[in-house]
Image (tube, helix red, strand yellow):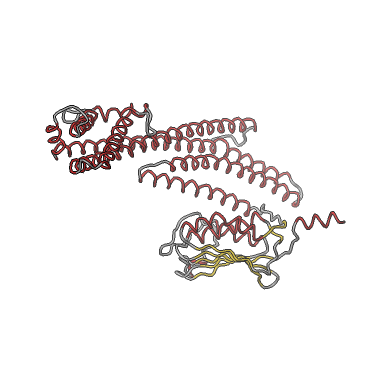
């Protein structure tokens, strides 16, 4: 068992060591990402050019027949010259590099495809023979034209050549897939290493510190004579522990953000469909994990009563537009209409906590856009009875059954699934918004009919505020 207490210096050294390990992992991941992007671009370009070469061979054969049929048609002759030239240049770039974005280093890795013998000939030899026979038949090279005509008219010979080009494309695809699989294995090993680092950090830093804080908490409680003084010291200890949780959550989020950034970069390159979908899943998983960390920290603060509502003058319409701008774009990509409506009787400036109000808006709008596949999402702000105002998020999405609505604001309850509705998550988003609305002397409720959309309504006190420039002008006048 570990000792109950660990000296702060020991914890500090462990913490610095863990940060150094994480920094090393991030640098290694960055280098791996750059290599993956470079190799992926080279491989994708090679596959595209090889496929183009396959199509050019067919075009060349077709234009050759048209040129023979219409020898005086200069358009066919010019098109055939251009196609043959592009065919030759493409093959040279694939086998030697130096053109069309292909490097000589990449060509070295591909050389085996073009120099390996198949049926007694390499692909380089087959390409050279194909081009030579074409030029002989056209009278642009010396040789037996009848033999050239027989060769190019022989379906077995030309089909064999086209098959060889097809095999080259498949070989390049297999090589690219092997490179992607290698990077995927390396990425998996890197992710495992990162998880091990995080586990070690929790084992040797987080848990000992938690025990130290708990020990300090009990000592403080035992040493206090007055209950009021004891409560104040307990609050200080809880704040210290919550601050430690907040710092640790930031440390956990840092590698997740870096991982997301690298995945985003890799997704910009052309990858096989399966790999792209798998990386997209990694991307979504890291986003969900970051959101879970934030939600758990908020729950911790709410449970310990450490969330403070800090009101200030804010311009409501601009706050709503700024908070929902990302989801407006997401809705437009889904083909959903997105509207914002602020009633004229709502003052331009009100007193509210911008951070917590944005958090409520963000969560409600995110859910609405996520579960609406056609129709619209509307954000409305209007007056409510009793000197209050209501923020409503209305969608035409899947809706929620009446029996499931009771579970929406309970913590750590996975929301019951409905037909076509996603399940999963920690069940913290709506409960956190519900608690934040109560802290702001308001309430959060829902009205929904399964299959006909939902309306989430946050009713909050309406406190009129003056614009900051008006307040400054009043102070200057005084």
214 and 152: which is toward the camera: 152
Task: Residue 63: name its quadrant.
Answer: top left
The residue most toward the bottom is 385
Residue at left offset 45%, top offset 58%: 423
Viewer-proximal residue among 132 and 124: 132
Q: Is residue 93 left or right of residue 260?
A: left
Count of number-bearing discs:
0
Horizontal side of 470 relative to 263 (left or right) equals right
| Residue 85 as seen in the image, left or right of residue 7 | left
The residue lying toward the viewer, choosing from 141 and 124, is 141
Q: In the figure, is residue 125 to the left or right of 249?
A: left
Is the residue 387 above or below the residue 87 in the image? Answer: below
Residue furthest out toward the right: 478
Q: Residue at x 26, y 29 (%)?
A: 114
Q: Position of residue 190 (x, y in %)?
A: 45, 35
Q: Quadrant of residue 205?
A: top right
From the top left corner, tell me how far across and down residue 312 is, in percent.
72, 56
- Tell me: residue 395, above or below residue 240: below
- Residue 254 on image: x %, y %: 55, 40
In percent of width and height, residue 21 lies at: 53, 31
Pick the front one: 130 or 4? 130
Figure quadrant of the C terminus:
bottom right
Task: Please identify the quadrant where the N terminus is shown.
Answer: top right
């Amino acid at each position: 068992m570990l000792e109950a207490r660990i000296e702060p210096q020991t914890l500090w050294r462990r913490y610095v060591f863990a940060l150094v390990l994480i920094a090393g992992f991030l640098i290694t991941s960055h280098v791996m990402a750059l290599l993956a992007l470079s190799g992926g671009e080279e491989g994708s370009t090679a596959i595209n050019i090889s496929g183009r070469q396959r199509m050019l061979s067919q075009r060349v054969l077709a234009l050759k027949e048209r040129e023979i049929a219409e020898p005086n048609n200069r358009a066919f002759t010019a098109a055939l010259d251009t196609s043959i030239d592009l065919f030759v240049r493409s093959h040279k770039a694939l086998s030697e590099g130096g053109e069309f974005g292909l490097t000589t280093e990449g060509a070295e890795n591909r050389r085996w495809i073009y120099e390996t013998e198949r049926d007694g000939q390499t692909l380089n030899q087959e390409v050279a023979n194909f081009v030579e026979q074409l030029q002989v038949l056209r009278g642009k090279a010396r040789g037996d034209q009848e033999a050239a005509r027989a060769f190019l008219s022989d379906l077995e010979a030309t089909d064999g050549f086209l098959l060889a080009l097809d095999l080259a494309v498949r070989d390049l695809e297999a090589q690219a897939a092997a490179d992607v699989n290698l990077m995927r294995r390396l990425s998996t090993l890197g992710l495992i290493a990162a998880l091990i680092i995080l586990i070690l950090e929790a084992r040797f830093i987080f848990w000992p510190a938690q025990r130290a804080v708990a020990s300090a908490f009990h000592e403080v409680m035992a040493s206090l004579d007055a209950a009021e003084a004891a409560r104040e010291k307990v609050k200080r200890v809880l704040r210290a522990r919550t601050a430690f949780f907040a710092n640790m959550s930031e440390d956990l989020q840092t590698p997740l953000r870096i991982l997301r950034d690298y995945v985003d970069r890799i997704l910009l390159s052309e990858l096989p469909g399966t790999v792209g979908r798998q990386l997209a899943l990694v991307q979504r998983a890291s986003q969900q994990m970051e959101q879970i960390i934030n939600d758990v920290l908020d729950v911790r603060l709410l449970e310990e009563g450490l969330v403070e509502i800090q009101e200030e003058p804010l311009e409501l319409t601009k706050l709503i537009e700024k908070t929902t701008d990302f989801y407006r774009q997401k809705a437009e990509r889904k083909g959903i209409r997105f509207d914002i409506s602020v009633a004229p009787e709502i003052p331009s400036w009100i007193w509210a906590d911008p951070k917590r109000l944005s958090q409520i808006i963000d969560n409600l709008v995110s859910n609405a856009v996520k579960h609406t596949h056609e129709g619209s999402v509307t954000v409305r702000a209007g007056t409510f009875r009793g000197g209050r105002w209501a923020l409503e998020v209305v969608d035409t999405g899947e809706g929620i059954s009446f029996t499931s609505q009771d579970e929406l604001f309970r913590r750590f309850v996975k929301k019951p699934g409905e037909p076509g509705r996603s399940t999963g998550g920690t069940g913290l988003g709506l409960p956190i918004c519900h608690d934040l609305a109560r802290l702001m002397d308001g309430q959060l409720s829902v009205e929904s009919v399964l299959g006909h959309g939902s309306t989430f309504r946050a009713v909050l006190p309406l406190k009129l505020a003056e614009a900051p420039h008006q307040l400054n002008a009043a102070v200057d006048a005084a």
